[in-house]
Image (cartoon, grey):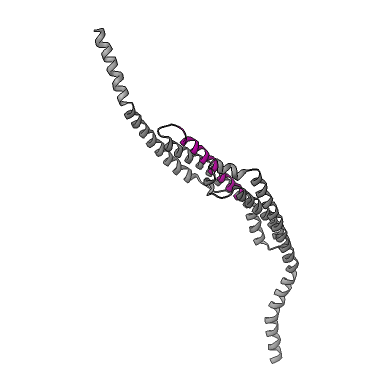
Amino acid sequence: MVSEYLNITKEFVMNPIIFVGQNVLATLPGIFGAIIIILLGLLIAKILGNATKKILYKLGLDKYLIEHKLDNAIGMVSASKISGDIVKWYVFVLFLIPAVNVLKLGDISLLIIDFVKWFPSLIFGIVIVICGLLVSEYCSRNLKNTTFKFKNQIALCIKLIILFFFLDVALSEIGLNIVFIENVFLLILGGFIFALSLAMGIGLGFALKEEGKEFFNTIIKEIEKKD
């Protein structure tokens, strides 16, 4: 009776341990293979990222942005470094797919693969936003250098429109539904344009008040002379 109880207890305790041990031993080759792929991916990604950064720096990308005062649009950060980091992480993520396939984690592998497939869209969205920041800053700065009376207000309006356009494209690329945000922005933009038009009209009216008065006085004098 005691020996039978010991055998049952032994099977109850040892069987799960043996099962786990066998699974671990079976997955060890996959784990080592995944580690090797990830390390190789990190190495290649770092090499390509550094190469991209150095090439863009030597081509004068950072210098160009600083000379045209566009570096503040991206937070005074080196554009070459940002580009290098984007390339590095993009390449690294590409190596995650074979690493996950080697592990054979079932549904978890499918989730990770879906994320990896979506990640390039995220990278592309970030690139679009950065381009939008640079383009909007460039257009805004050029408008502020003009002689328009309401140049600052017009520059701000143009900057917001450009930023929204690029942000809209970026979020769509990422896969987010932004219909509500688009509608809210259009309402705000419409109100801003109306207020700006009203201010410009009032300002123009005051600016031409004296000129208009002189013009009408001249006409009246000419009529009186003819009479």
- Of the pair 27 and 119, the residue shown nearer to us: 119
- The relative height of residue 45 versus residue 190 in the rendered view (above or below) is below
Q: Residue at x 75, y 69 (%)?
A: 26
Residue 132 in percent (x, y) is at: 54, 42
Q: Quadrant of the C terminus?
A: top left
| Residue 220 as seen in the image, left or right of residue 11 | left
Q: Nearer the viewer, residue 22 or 131?
A: 131
Residue 161 in the image: state x and y as whole percent. 48, 39
In this view, 145 is above or below 21 = above
In this rendering, the answer to whether 39 lies above or below 130 is: below
Q: Is residue 1 visible from the viewing direction of this image?
A: no
Secondary structure, magenta segment, majority class: helix
Magenta run includes residue 216 = no
The part of the chain drawn in magenta is 122-146
Q: Position of residue 167 (x, y in %)?
A: 53, 44
Residue extending furthest toward the top: 227
Residue 141: percent from the left, percent from the top?
49, 38
Q: Which quadrant of the figure has residue 222?
A: top left
123 in relation to 43, above or below: above
Q: Describe residue 99's horizontal placement relative to residue 191 as left or right.
A: right
Q: Is residue 43 visible?
A: yes
Say which quarter of the image contains residue 47.
bottom right
Query: Residue at the spot x=51%, y=37% of the render?
Result: 139
Compare residues 135 and 211 and report the one nearer the observer: 211
Verify whether residue 124 appears in magenta.
yes
